[in-house]
Amino acid sequence: MDGISVNYYVGLSTILFVIGATGVLIRRNALIIFMSVELMLNAGNLAFVAFASAHDLLNGQVFVFFIMTVAAAEVAVGLALIVAIFRSKKSINVDEINVLKG
Amino acid sequence: MNFSEAATSGLFFHLAPWLVFFPVIGLLINMIFGGKMSEKAVGTVASLASGAAFVVSVLLAYSLNAVHGELQTVPFAEWIHIGQLQLDWTFRVDSLSTVMMLVVSGVGTLIHIYAIGYMHEDVRFHDEVKRFRRFFVFLNLFIAMMMILVSGDSYLMLFVGWEGVGLCSFLLIGFWYDFDTLGRKSTANAEAGKKAFIANRVGDFGFLLAIFTTFWHFGTLQFDGVFEAAAAHPDPYVISAITLFMLIGVTGKSAQVPLYVWLPDAMAGPTPVSALIHAATMVTAGVYLVVRSAPLYSVVHSASYIVAMIGAVTALFAATIAVGQYDIKKVLAYSTISQLGFMVAAVGTGAYVAGIFHLAAHAFFKALLFLSAGSVILGMERGHHHLAHGHGDHADADAHHEDGEVFDPGDMRNMGNLRKQMPVTFWLYLAGTLALAGIFPFAGFWSKDEILLDAKLHAEHFPGVYWLLAIAAFLTAFYMGRQIWMVFYGKERTEVAKHAQESPPIMTVPLMFLAFLAVFGGALNLPFEGFHNLGHWLEYTIGHVEDLPLNLGVAGVSTLLALLAIFLSWLIYGKNPIKAGQPDPLKKALGPIFTGMENKWFVDEGYKAVVLDPFQKLAKFLSITLDWNFWHDWFHESVIYGFFKWLAAFLSDPVDMGIINAVADWLADLTKRSSESLRRLQNGFVRSYALSVLLGVVAILGYLLFK
């Protein structure tokens, strides 16, 4: 990866993160939101490995493994929830899931 | 150690506290176990307790004689020690107090025994054993209190006994508090007790002032201390004040003018009480007090003269009332007041021996007369009962309520010729009468003559006393003669009198002892060379006493007056006995004067108009106007209640509702409104929450970047 400045990686990571965040904010489909969240996590991962490689430190690399593990667990729980909601509501539109409204 | 050695060594003096303990033990036994004891047992315990006190008195007198009359003080208990005030309960055994002890316990014991027989037959006695027991408890308490009075070594200890006997007097006058003297339901007896108590309060207040003044001036209340201080620095003004205040106490307790009015009413008590308390012992406490305080009275002549005059005036005044009375006990009551007047006059003129001599003799013959009168009354009761129920019917006092008109067994107009039905009582009564009238050689002759002789010898210092007393002595013989003729001679004026019955021996035997004393009691102090026993005995206490020889002039005049009076009473009441329903023959002869005598000179009515009515008006004013209208209605209801009502309204409305409540309401409202606006954030849209998170993160990052 020599020759390519870390700025590009961070720029790409920022773009991915903004896309993910925008997806979370504007999409109504719970699955899409989920995928956007994954996108944000992976944007974070990209930033970690970029900085880790630039500074020759393993901390960032190790952190990425943690985040991937947490993301896998999150997906497992999240998908199970979405399936359960879909079974009762026949919809995964998050705007319809508003029974906790104050 | 044999008996006389014990007496000389003074061993017996340590028995002095038992003068009080024996009666107290007796009353405690009766109080605790009396409920389960028979009437006889209760009476026996009480009589034994009193008799034991008499034995102690005799031992004390005997021992005192063995040590030649030297004053003995027996410390018993510490009482009050405050600064200068050092007061202990100490028994004072001297020749004066032993005379009183002997009289009180001796006469008291005889009366206890008599009362065993008497109380059971009283019309008001409804077989209540509790009442019977209570009576003897009170009698024993009286003996104990009287012993405290006469054996006290200080004015305060004397005062303790003084008040104690006053209490017993009150309790016993109102003993039948729920019946009147005729056995009807009434509060009259309770009121008589109240009257005695209140009249004595007036006197006791004077006595208390005397005690306070004594302590203030002399710094001690112990007799010897006071007398020594008075002898060392006689201040006539202070001593006059003390003696005159004390005199108020004497007029209360010894029933002298002007406080005597309670004593005739005190006859409401059972007859043994009249004899013991209101004739023989308690009422002589005033005389004892003056003799005890002789060193004070001898300093100021004017005070002594006032004492003598009060005594003499009382003697005459009460004697005139006694002439106009119909109730057998009322005559004796006024006679008692009159004789107490003799004693007070005697001690006022400085004739202390004569006063104490007459006190003792009077205790004998007046107790005898009262108890015999009780026997007469019961005899009449028995006759009445006999007529009402026929033969063999058992006692039932309710019969007295069934008769339309209540029969008065004490009214002399209902009697007549009782000598036939009640011979023993008649002879006893006669002995008492002759002693009281002052006929030679009965006890009253010697004692009264000594008083008259002293009054005559000191006439220049005490003008008027002799003449008042001489006239009183004449009237004494007259009213006693009148009583004898009306009660025991003539014809029976009622059927009841015909059926009167003699009293049992338990009543008459004690009377025989008293009659013996009434006949021979003069031997205590015969006015012959070598016979002034009482005089020499009292010398140990009150200093040198002049032996007065028999003055034939004075004795002759008084005997002549007495005989004349008895003859006069025979002319009026004996020769032509009054018949049933006939008014008193004196009424025609004396007219309004007799009406006055009959109505006690309207003294009670006068007191009612001058003292009682204004007092009650004042009390009513205080209770209705001042207490109720002013304090209750105006001050409490309007001022205090109104103020609190206003204060409560002020605190509740503007303060509580206006400030405290408003603050609480505002807080609640604030919370409500803020939560209402905040709840809009919780719109349930996951995406808006996510936006919030994003904005938050941006804000925090912005802050971190640009801080």
Image (cartoon, rainbow, N blue to C red):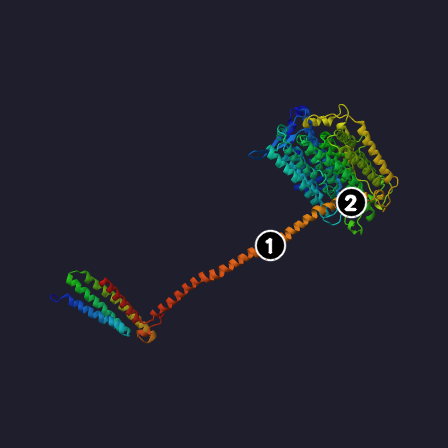
Viewer can see residue B229: yes
Q: Residue furthest right?
A: B576
Which sits earlier in the primary sequence, circle 2 or circle 1? 2
- Residue B36: in sight, yes or no? no
Say few, some or many: other residues with alpha carbon within 10 Å of mark 2 (under 14 / 14 to 19 / 20 or more).
some
| Chain letter of the residue beneath label 2 in the structure image | B
Disc 1 crowd rating (10 Å Cα; few below 14, some 14-19, many 20+) is some
Q: Quadrant of residue B529?
A: top right
Tell me where residue B28 appears, x and y as whole percent: 65, 39
Residue ID at (70%, 33%): B304
Q: How many numbered marks are there?
A: 2
Mark 2: which secondary structure? loop
Quadrant the C terminus of chain B occupies? bottom left
Determine whether B527 is above or below B647 in the image. above
Residue B584: image location, x then y, percent: 84, 44
Q: Nearer the viewer, residue B698 or B456?
A: B456
Name above or below for residue B344 compared with residue B395: above
